[in-house]
Amino acid sequence: MTRFILINGVRREMTAEEEAKYNQDVADTIAMRNADDLEYQDKESKKESGKQKLKDLGLTDAEIKALTGA
């Protein structure tokens, strides 16, 4: 698919190199977003696991909140 680029008000087709760079930038952005999402999910999972371990030790929700601030 031919992509177009706008430079100084002039619309033209991207060169093969520009289009390859554009496609790589899009792929890199998607990979970074996916990595950020996985990191966030991992952090949340660990947070919930930690809270559950504290509950298993017999702490109440109020005590857990006082200790962790969350």
Image (spheres, rainbow, N blue to C red):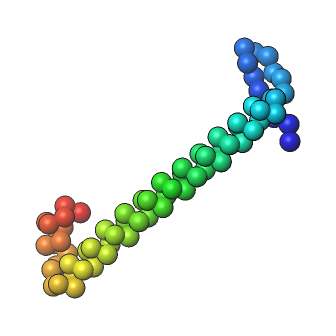
Please say if 58 is above or below 29.
Answer: below
Please say if 63 is above or below 35.
Answer: below
- Residue 34 shown left or right of residue 50 in the figure: right
- Work out which quarter of the rendered image holds the C terminus and state it: bottom left
Q: Quadrant of residue 62?
A: bottom left
- Residue 67 is situated, as x and y percent measured from the top left of the image, at 14, 66
Q: Residue at x 82, y 33 (%)?
A: 16
- Residue 18 shown left or right of residue 63 in the figure: right
Is residue 37 at least partly visible in the picture? yes
Please say if 16 is above or below 53.
Answer: above
Q: Residue at x 70, y 37 (%)?
A: 22
Q: Residue furthest top?
A: 8
- Residue 56 is situated, as x and y percent measured from the top left of the image, at 22, 85
Q: Residue at x 31, y 68 (%)?
A: 47
- Residue 19 shown left or right of residue 58 in the figure: right
Please say if 1 is above or below 61.
Answer: above
- Work out which quarter of the rendered image holds the N terminus and state it: top right
All told, the count of numbered labels is 0
- Residue 37 is situated, as x and y percent measured from the top left of the image, at 49, 58
Is residue 4 at least partly visible in the picture? no
Q: Residue at x 26, y 74 (%)?
A: 51
Q: Residue furthest front?
A: 17
